[in-house]
């Protein structure tokens, strides 16, 4: 498990590279030409990027390792004995780990919208009103706890190599940044497999469609799960390339805190009120 912590630290370098690349692409050819890159709350989003992209992940991983050892002393030895993909070719490890991880995370994301308690934490991500690449990292640290808790066991039994975890994390960051970016991308025929900014922006619609009041387009990297399970929504196809939601956010956004500290404590205070 220690190699996962090492990969988390190595991942931060690639997070910065991907972030700078997306920033440059938005500057060169933005989808919404009137949207400024140096927008309000950009400084706060940089803090979320560093916290959620580096320090929080390391801290939660370390705590998870410690707690797992306390609850089940032989846990890591047992998991080493499972390793379903331990002897598989590296390409198979990458493909299976990526698909399984994305499907489980699609389910968790769906749950964040349907469970009232978890939604209070997820509101932070939906407080985005001007969509750009850095919005990918605007989320409450509690979401990392939820994702780690619900995805850890099904992923760890696969027993993939540390480099596979790193490669999949980097690719996921590329797609996640692009999904939130101010770029006019659809991936053409691959739209039914891979998520895109043209599709994902409808997930952030302030006013979701009546038939899907709890949201649409829950895909993380892959869009296929939404098409298969009937949660896909994409009125802005190639025949209407400029069509976007009128406004982003959620009902009650005006009452949502705008400060960093206020947003961190909001879900806990909200639950008591």
Image: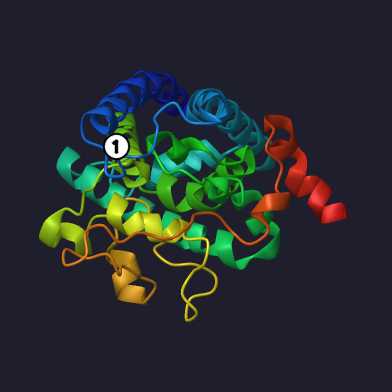
* Residue labelled with disc 1: 174
SS of the residue under disc 1: helix
> Residue 99 falls in which quadrant of the image?
bottom left
Estimate the x, y position of residue 127 in percent, counting from the top left: 58, 47
The reply to whether residue 26 is in sight is yes
Task: Determine whether 231 is above or below 52 in the image.
Answer: below
Q: Describe residue 215's horizontal placement relative to residue 121 as left or right.
A: left
Query: Which residue occupies the extreme front position in the image?
Result: 34
Estimate the x, y position of residue 63 in percent, counting from the top left: 63, 31
- Foreground of the two, 45 or 100: 45
Estimate the x, y position of residue 98 in percent, counting from the top left: 29, 48
> Residue 263 falls in which quadrant of the image?
top right
Identified at 46% across, 74% down, the residue is 209
> Which quarter of the rendering shows the C terminus?
bottom right
In this picture the colour scheme is rainbow
- Foreground of the two, 11 or 239: 239
The reply to whether residue 104 is in sight is no
Task: Determine whether 163 is above or below 142 in the image.
Answer: above
> Residue 59 falls in which quadrant of the image?
top right
Query: Which residue occupies the extreme left position in the image?
Result: 189
């Amino acid at each position: 498990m220690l190699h996962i912590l090492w990969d988390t630290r190595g991942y931060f370098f690639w997070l910065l590279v991907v972030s700078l690349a997306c920033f440059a692409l938005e500057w060169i050819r933005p989808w919404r030409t009137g949207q400024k890159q140096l927008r309000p709350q950009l400084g706060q989003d940089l803090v979320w990027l560093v916290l959620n992209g580096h320090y929080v992940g390391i801290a939660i991983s370390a705590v998870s390792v410690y707690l797992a050892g306390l609850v089940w002393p032989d846990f890591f030895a047992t998991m080493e004995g499972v390793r379903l993909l331990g002897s598989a070719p590296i390409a198979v490890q990458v493909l299976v780990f990526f698909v399984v991880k994305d499907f489980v995370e699609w389910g968790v994301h769906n749950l964040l919208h349907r469970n009232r308690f978890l939604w209070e934490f997820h509101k932070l991500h939906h407080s985005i009103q001007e969509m750009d690449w850095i919005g990918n990292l605007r989320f409450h640290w509690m979401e990392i706890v939820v994702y780690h808790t619900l995805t850890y066991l099904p992923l760890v039994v696969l027993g993939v190599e540390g480099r596979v975890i790193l490669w999949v994390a980097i690719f996921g960051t590329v797609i996640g940044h692009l999904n939130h970016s101010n770029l006019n991308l659809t991936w053409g025929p691959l739209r039914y497999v891979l998520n895109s900014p043209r599709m994902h922006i409808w997930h952030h619609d302030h006013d979701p469609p009546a038939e899907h009041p709890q949201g649409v387009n829950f895909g993380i990297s892959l869009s296929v799960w939404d098409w298969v399970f009937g949660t896909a929504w994409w009125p802005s196809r190639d025949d209407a390339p400029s069509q976007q939601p009128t406004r982003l956010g959620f009902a009650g956004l005006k009452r949502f805190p705008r400060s960093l500290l206020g947003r961190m404590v909001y879900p806990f205070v909200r639950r008591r009120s």
